[in-house]
Image: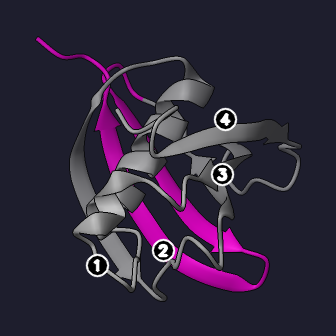
Amino acid sequence: MLQEDFYTILSSEFLPGEDQPLPGTESFRIRVHLDPGHRIYQGHFPGSPVVPGVCQIQMVKEGLETMKQVHGMLTVADNVKFLSMIVPSEHPDLTIEYTVKPPDDTNLFFSAIIRDGETVFLKFKGTLCTKLS
């Protein structure tokens, strides 16, 4: 888990659902603060730190689990687009926006965007399996 070490959640909010194209779809967002001095940047990359892609995906997963109060495993990553590098000293506070489709018995189908203002860093579409055996 990266939460409370690599990053902390500053705030979260569920968004009104009246504009959703599919009944039962939810939207929410969280604001996170990165630790620009975290030890991971010693290796990624010394002197020019950027947030590793795997850490971005883990933040998306953990934020979804926190907001939906579930635990699970990412089983599908349909679409992952890294659009800009996150330099933690320049963008220590980020917003992660989620849209979650109605779940089935075992899966949450969702999309997420990591951004800071108008700058989009990651677009992600995937499935979180919540029934682990």
Magenta segment includes 112: yes
> Mark 4 or mark 3, which is nearer to you?
3
Task: Judge by depth and name the residue closer to the eye, 69 or 38.
Answer: 38
Q: Residue at x 40, y 69 (%)?
A: 51
x and y percent of residue 32 in the render?
Answer: 66, 49
Residue 33: mark:
3
**Local SS, label 3:** strand
Q: How crowded is mark 2: few (under 14 residues within 10 Å), some or many (20 or more)?
A: many
Residue 122: mark:
2
x and y percent of residue 111 in the render?
Answer: 50, 58
Instruction: State the CA–CA distance, disc 4 to disc 3.
Output: 30 Å
Task: Give amino acid for label 4.
Answer: Gly
Q: Is 5 left, or right, of 17 in this rendering?
A: left
x and y percent of residue 120 in the render?
Answer: 61, 81
Which residue position holds label 4? 24
Task: Give amino acid for label 2.
Answer: Leu
Q: Is residue 63 above or below residue 126?
A: above
> Mark 4 or mark 1, which is nearer to you?
1
Task: Give amino acid for label 1.
Answer: Phe
